[in-house]
Image (cartoon, grey):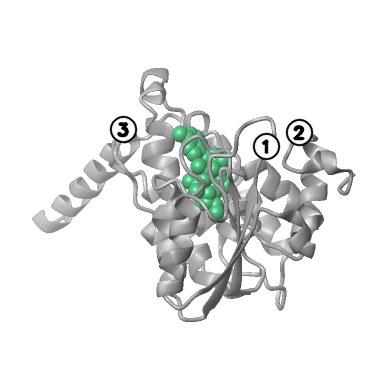
Amino acid sequence: MNQLTTFKILATFCVCISFICTLPSSYKTLKDIIINRCNDFQKKYTNDHELALKKRINCNTLWNTFLNSFSGKDICQIKSYDELFKSIKLKPIKNKALFWSGTNYIAHNFTEIKKNFYTLEDTFPGYIANNWNWCVLLEIDNKKCKKNCGYKSNGEPYWKKASETFAASAEGTAYVMLNGNNPKKAVDPTSIFAQVEIPVLKKKSNIEQLVFFVVNDQNTKAQENCSKGSLKNLMINLKKEKKKTECYDNPKKSDILNATVSLICKLKPTAYDCTSNQYH
Ligand SMILES: NC(=O)c1ccc[n+]([C@@H]2O[C@H](COP(=O)([O-])OP(=O)(O)OC[C@H]3O[C@@H](n4cnc5c(N)ncnc54)[C@H](O)[C@@H]3O)[C@@H](O)[C@H]2O)c1
């Protein structure tokens, strides 16, 4: 064995050891979830379905690429998922993309019934990672979890990249469900919607229109609506970018919103305008 070969073997050994040392003892549950969801998704959506991936993904390779995002890094170091997302190619989602912020529960109950809208969580990257407890799955110790490393350093960068990918795949009219009672703002400047999705949608020439639904709770004073606050400002900015906008905080104006509100009223009878009987 010459010196160069010995050096290569030693170097590989050191890389492996440092990789193993920085990883928790086992990622078995995480691995199972990723591989199972990856296979399930590709069985469910095949060929010409609009949610099917442009190119089939090998789920074991996907898992290894995911794991590489962590290798050699401290759990509290912000991760990059750029490599992982290089292999995930979504088809265009025309007139059906629904973005949400502060309305996780209601938006997903809505799409569950109105099957012709898709949220990020219906697409491959959202489907594989939805509802993860990053601290548990990454086996992060309590002290670091309390520092919010689990989500902020590992989960949030994943969702930012996934949200960017989803926004980049939207075309035509994009829909947005916001929370008028959000104690911050309906368009919270620290949210992924404001920081990641809006900038991508703004730049896309094939995004023609954004339709906003503002969900309110009548027990709490609405902070903002279509003609007041952060949403109004966003619509002014979008118009400057030549995007058409519509905004509904009056349910009677839109069929889509009628459906939304009747569903919201079933789930949450104190929500905006539910007592008017129209939606029961
Ligand atoms: N499915 C998800 O969990 C998820 C998470 C982030 C972003 N997104 C995408 O971005 C948009 C919503 O993001 P947003 O930031 O505007 O809205 P938001 O403020 O409502 O946050 C979205 C979700 O992020 C998760 N989250 C936020 N802070 C967290 C924390 N500290 N610890 C654990 N989980 C936390 C929660 O599941 C929350 O429902 C959607 O359009 C969606 O496409 C989805």
Q: In this view, does 7 lie to the left or right of 260?
A: left
Nearest the eye: 244 or 168 = 244
Q: Does the residue labelled 3 lie within 8 Å of ligand 1?
A: no
Q: In this view, does 121 lie above or below 145?
A: below
Find disc 1 in the rendering and name its residue: 217
Query: How far is mark 2 from mark 1, CA to CA?
Result: 6 Å
Location of residue 266 (image quadrant): top right
Residue at figure coordinates x 51%, y 81% from the top left: 206
In percent of width and height, residue 168 lies at: 48, 69
Discs 3, 2 touching: Cβ within 8 Å: no
In percent of width and height, residue 225 lies at: 57, 50
* Residue type highlighted by circle 2: Thr
Find disc 2 in the rendering and name its residue: 270
Discs 2, 1 touching: Cβ within 8 Å: yes
Q: How crowded is mark 2: few (under 14 residues within 10 Å), some or many (20 or more)?
A: some
Query: How far is mark 3 from mark 1, CA to CA?
Result: 49 Å
* Residue type highlighted by circle 1: Asp
In percent of width and height, residue 112 lies at: 77, 52
Q: Residues within 10 Å of mark 3 (few under 14, many from 20)?
A: few
Nearest the eye: 206 or 92 = 206
- Residue 66: which disc? none
Q: Point out the frontmost of discs 3 and 1.
A: 1
Discs 3, 1 touching: Cβ within 8 Å: no
Q: In this view, does 51 lie to the left or right of 57?
A: right
- Residue 21: which disc? 3
Q: Is residue 187 above or below residue 91?
A: above
Does residue 107 appear in the picture of this structure? yes
For marks 3 and 2 on the same chain, the one whose residue lies earlier in the sequence: 3
* Residue type highlighted by circle 3: Cys
Helix, strand or loop at mark 3: helix
For marks 2 and 1 on the same chain, the one whose residue lies earlier in the sequence: 1
Residue at figure coordinates x 46%, y 28% from the top left: 139
